[in-house]
Image: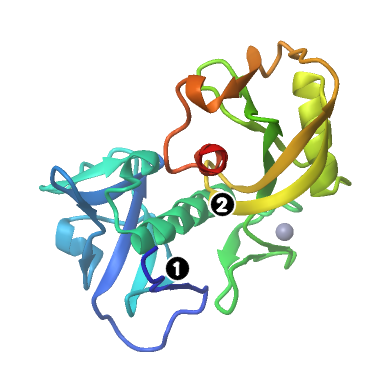
Amino acid sequence: MAEDSSTLSARSPRGGEADAFWFVVSRRRLLVATDTDAAAIPFGERLDRWGLVGLRQQYLGTLRGFSCHGVEVSDKTPAPQGMAFVGLRSLYGLLEEDSFKVALTAMHLVEWDRTSQFCGRCGAKTELRREERAKECTACGAIVFPRISPAVIVLVERGDRVLLARASRFPDSVVAGFVEPGESLEQTVSREIEEETGILVEDVRYFGSQPWPFPDSLMVGFTARYASGELRIDDKEIVDARWFSVDDLPQIPEKVSIARKLIDWFIEKQR
Ligand SMILES: [Zn+2]
């Protein structure tokens, strides 16, 4: 893994304009300079260099020692010459790993900024706070932090086989679901698996986590072992669920996802 050269902070350094990275978002797509096998984040002193006008702007932190700004531009903004607005998932592997990490943050915060323009308590305008990543209502003083929605994602093993389930329109994957109020992560794991597939699991272990800003999730990965029960799909979220051995895996999720990292972990273990 490349050395992580990014720091994420709401506090911008003092001083005037200097070269910076611009994470420009339009319709949930990120502006990048592209050629066939790499992509780069626009870099320069000012956004208007590319003829772009930001609707809203936030300081994100630093990347390789330079400031990073997240900017939303209007839906109708055309990409400057040599650049394109590209969905974040397709940029995985094209952007440097440290840039991709800041891009995830930018996507999350630009969307948060866009959808928290007004106070949820009194309806007045909010504004960004200077010293922390939060917004404050200009009328009642309510403070709003960026929303993060935790979800669990679980790989269930049964001997040399793994449980993969398929939701309509998606490839087969490990089971996932949002944490509900009052639940521990472990409770969510057990509940989601039982609801969606009818089985009970044991030996639930933490695997790792991944921010997933579509729009604001934090995916918390676990592994678990089959304990009891027969597979029975819920027919609402899941259209199929089966045990697969490493030799007969179906099409699995793309490399960017923690789902894929869990499946790769299982494949590695079986070899
Ligand atoms: Zn208010």
Which residue occupies the foreground of this view, 1 or 219? 1
Dot 1: within a 10 Å radius of its alpha carbon, few (fewer than 14), some, or many (20 or more) residues? many
Residue to which mark 2 is pinned? 210
> Which SS class for mark 1?
strand
Please say if 35 is above or below 163: below
Asked if residue 56 can be seen in this view, the reply is no
Q: Are marks 1 and 2 in contact (CB under 8 Å)?
A: no
> Which SS class for mark 2?
strand
| Name of the residue lying farthest toward the front | 271
The residue at the point 52 percent across, 27 percent down is 246
Q: Position of residue 113 (x, y in %)?
A: 52, 55
Which residue occupies the foreground of this view, 198 or 118? 198
- Badge 1 or badge 2: first in the primary sequence: 1
Question: Marks 1 and 2, how far apart in space?
Answer: 18 Å
What label does residue 60 carry, if any?
1
The residue at the point 35 percent across, 89 percent down is 15
Please say if 248 is above or below 128: above
| Name of the residue lying farthest toward the right | 182
- Name the quarter where the N terminus is drawn: bottom left
Left or right, 215 with reference to 187: left
Q: Position of residue 126 (x, y in %)?
A: 61, 60
The amino acid at mark 1 is Leu
Q: Position of residue 201 (x, y in %)?
A: 82, 33
The image quarter in which residue 154 lies = top right
Which residue occupies the foreground of this view, 111 or 41? 41
Please say if 22 is above or below 166: below
The amino acid at mark 2 is Gln
Which residue occupies the foreground of this view, 251 or 133? 251
